[in-house]
Image (cartoon, rainbow, N blue to C red):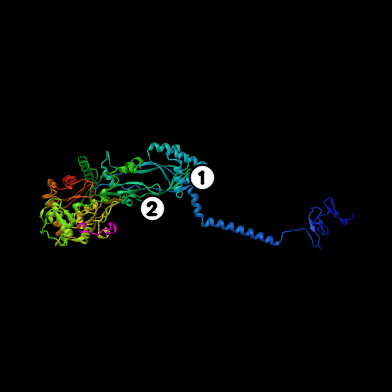
Amino acid sequence: MEEKNKIFLDDRVLEKRDLDGKYKKSWVEESFAFEKSFGKQTASSGTKNYLGTSVKESKIFFLVIIIVLGVFLIFFKVSYLQLWRGNYYFGLAENNRVRLKPISAARGIIYDRFGNELTQNVPNFILAIVPQDLPVDEEKRKKVIAKISEVSGITEENLDNLLEKYKFYNYESLLIKDNLDYNTAITLYIQNADLPGIYIGKSTKRQYLIGDNAIGGLSFSHLLGYLGKLNESELEELKNSGYLISDNIGKIGLEKFYEKELRGTYGMKKIEVDALGHEQSVLAEDPPTPGKNLYLSIDLEAQNKLEELIKNSFAKNGKKKSAAIAMDPRDGSVLAMVSWPTFDSNLFAGGITQKDYDAYLKDENNPLFNRAISGTYPSGSIVKPVIAAAALEEKIITPRQTIMSVGGLQIGDWFFPDWKVGGHGATNVTKALAWSVNTFFFYVGGGYKNFDGLGLARLLKYLRDFNLAQKTDIDLPGESEGFLPSEEWKEETKNEQWYIGDTYNLSIGQGDLSVTPIQAAVWTSAIANGGKIFSPRLGNKFIDPITQTEEKIKPKIIRENFVSQENLAVVRQGMRECVTYGSCQLLQTLPFMAAGKTGTAQWNSKKSTHAWFTSFAPYNDPQIVVTILVEEGGEGSVASMPIARDFLAWWGKKYLPR
């Protein structure tokens, strides 16, 4: 073999004929030299073909672009996470170790006017779940839920529904069970110390010092109200105001009306937690501000006395439903207010059982209903002082002018009777009030023959001036407006025209007129005080428990100077004559002068009339108004007036100088 046809690779010889494949030509035509010592291949000078890459330059460029873009994207993502989203992810990481935990504020205490405590905040324990601390693993999570179900008595399905319902409140405690006693709380804490997501915490329970073996009667329940857990709509409305899922809120009564002042301001503490979410240490703390203490105008003794008198009366006459109000006509402050029957606020504050709640709902006497501010009834004759004041102010009559009462009025085929057969003879305005003479008020209200009465328009004006068919703005939620009928209303609702008989009925407090007991007390107060319509108030003042700063709740005048002092004095005289010789003579037994007005309101042809009585005392210096309603009580002078008389006698001994 010739030397030129041989290629030396180390000690092996590769001949030209042994080369095959697509590289044969290149290998043969290319000149190579190998360094003997290292075997390094080098291309001979002058050759134009040698071994190299087969990747095109365009592909290399494209690959470089991809690499550069990838590096840029990685750099941009890292920068974005650190610069723009750094705080967010830092917060997520910190929440696994450090958390902000709200500290509930002590709720303000409610007292009567003399400082008698009516509510307390009693420490208790709660069982709760913190969703964020539950295991992520599904199986482990189910085991924890099963354990929570076991200790709480709540089904796993309900627990799952609760977690789903509040899935956007991961770091808040979801209340599972309230009112745990100390021993139960400690036992649960020890048994479940190693379970993530379970929280045994301290809380307070609102206790009302009413009912058996307490200082106050159950009639306080309608006034104080009670606390309850936030429902979904309340949470949605108040979550931006600092309310939490586990919070309590005033549901009815003073607890609801003065929620903002009683609640206080929550504090906050920064805590460090372990892997199970259990608190390990407090890093920082901002203390809460307790709610303000509320002092009422209510007199504990007066409230209990009024409740006692109503219950004693019902024990004798078999009646079951009543509303009674005692208030100061000088400023609208309420001394006592009873709606009977009633309920126990403590049952609701502790989480009422379904059995107890159903019992209240099924009670035909509706004990949950506050009749004093929400019940609406025809007023009967207790509205006649308002009609008399309107007639005097419009000069329909004078104080000495008389109208002949012969037992009723005949209008076509209709006869409108007086309550006394044969009538009362010649009657002026004071006698008409003393004996509640219907005929007199038919005349001054609707007119008769040549006598021009007030007419519907002026009747409605003065009834509204005395605040009928309007809320009194009392500091209790749930007040009703009552109702005043009109021509337009009757045409639209009953498809009937307005008749003179409708005006007559309105003039004596019958027909479609409806009022609340609190409205009756307000217009009686306006007559007693010389024409001021006060908004009634149970709240008297707030006291800051830390600074002891006092904040008075000022009286609010809704309206005044719409009837002259002289005309109101005539009306008061008529109500006084009701006591001296008229239908209110039972009040003559009082050791001081009083004035009053009886009322008997028809409302159902098959049921007994409602019994009304309203009064004020002392006559020459009115300091108290007492208004009593007994549903289906019959005659006001029989069912309601004795309660008012006995209460006024008690009040005089305590409040009037001897």
User: Where in the figure is residue 616, as x and y percent of width and height?
Assistant: 17, 51
The residue singled out by tag 2 in the image is: 238
Image mark count:
2
Quarter of the picture holding the N terminus = bottom right
The residue singled out by tag 1 in the image is: 136
- In this picture, residue 211 sits left or right of residue 652: right
Residue 561 visible, this orientation: no
The range drawn in magenta is 491-502
Q: Secondary structure at mark 1?
A: loop
Residue 156 visible, this orientation: yes
Callout 1 environment at 10 Å: few (<14), some (14 to 19), or many (20+)?
Answer: few
Callout 2 environment at 10 Å: few (<14), some (14 to 19), or many (20+)?
Answer: few
- In this picture, residue 204 sits left or right of residue 89: left
Viewer-nearest residue: 518 or 284: 518
Residue 625 lies in the magenta stretch = no
- In this picture, residue 200 sits left or right of residue 376: right
